[in-house]
Amino acid sequence: MLTFALAAFLLIITPGPGVLTTAGVGAGYGYRHGGNYVLGLFLGSNLVVLAVVTGLAAVLLADPVIRTVLLWASAAYLLYLAYRIAFSGTKIAFIGAPRPPGIAGGLMLQIINPKAYVVATTLFSGFQIWESALLLEILVKFLIMNAIWIPVHILWLSAGVFLHRLDLAPRTQFVINVCMAVAMLSVVALAAYREF
């Protein structure tokens, strides 16, 4: 179980669309709006896990047309987010938006987030805890994953709020934005590499 928990921590904390946008919402809108966005991400993350565990994701992704359309749609959206992050100016907000994305924004991001599917598939198919108690294993993995997921996303939200309060030099803020955009692009590249 410790190996599973460590893998879950490392997979969840690494930069991907969910945590990067969480930091961005924190930087741009603070804790209140950020909390709504994180709730949406949380619901979306658990829906992705349910889709993976029940096999729904495998059934949908088994069709090459559906898989390709979903891959290109999510890649296009993530490229758009990376663009918005990189060119959001010299103000750290990771992503500029006229209003906070809210619960629906977080939910929709996780549903098209390729990293969410990779993490769920890795955690729920790659770490066997009990051979003869599949349902108990799934339940325990859900609990462990969420016990890690929640504080990690609160940490990223807090990092965004903290960066906003630092009042860094414009060039430093621009460099941070570009680094976050590159991290987002790496997720797109990894998803495309896995597909092709």
Image (cartoon, rainbow, N blue to C red):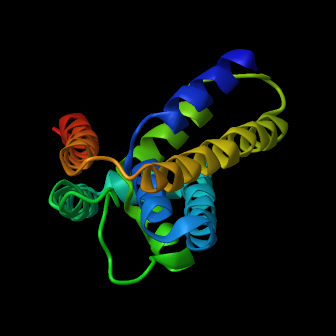
Residue 60 on image: x %, y %: 39, 60
Residue located at (18% from left, 45% from top):
171
Examine the rendering and report whether any part of residue 52 can be seen: no
Residue 145 on image: x %, y %: 68, 40
Query: Where is 24 relative to 152, above or below?
Result: below
Is residue 151 or residue 178 the one in the foreground?
178
Examine the rendering and report whether any part of residue 115 can be seen: yes
State which quarter of the image contains the N terminus. Answer: top right
Relative placement, left or right, of 95 versus 57 is: left
Residue located at (80% from left, 43% from top):
139
State which quarter of the image contains the C terminus. Answer: top left
When asked about the image quadrant of residue 7, the answer is: top right
Is residue 58 or residue 124 the one in the foreground?
124
Relative placement, left or right, of 181 versus 161 is: left
Residue 173 on image: x %, y %: 26, 48
Residue 30 on image: x %, y %: 54, 67
How many marks can you see? 0
Relative placement, left or right, of 105 versus 152 is: left
User: Which residue is at the far top?
Assistant: 3
Residue located at (61% from left, 65% from top):
31
Query: Where is 115 relative to 43, above or below?
Result: above
Query: Where is 100 relative to 128, above or below?
Result: below
Residue located at (57% from left, 74% from top):
33
User: Which residue is at the far bottom?
Assistant: 98
Query: Where is 141 relative to 6, above or below?
Result: below
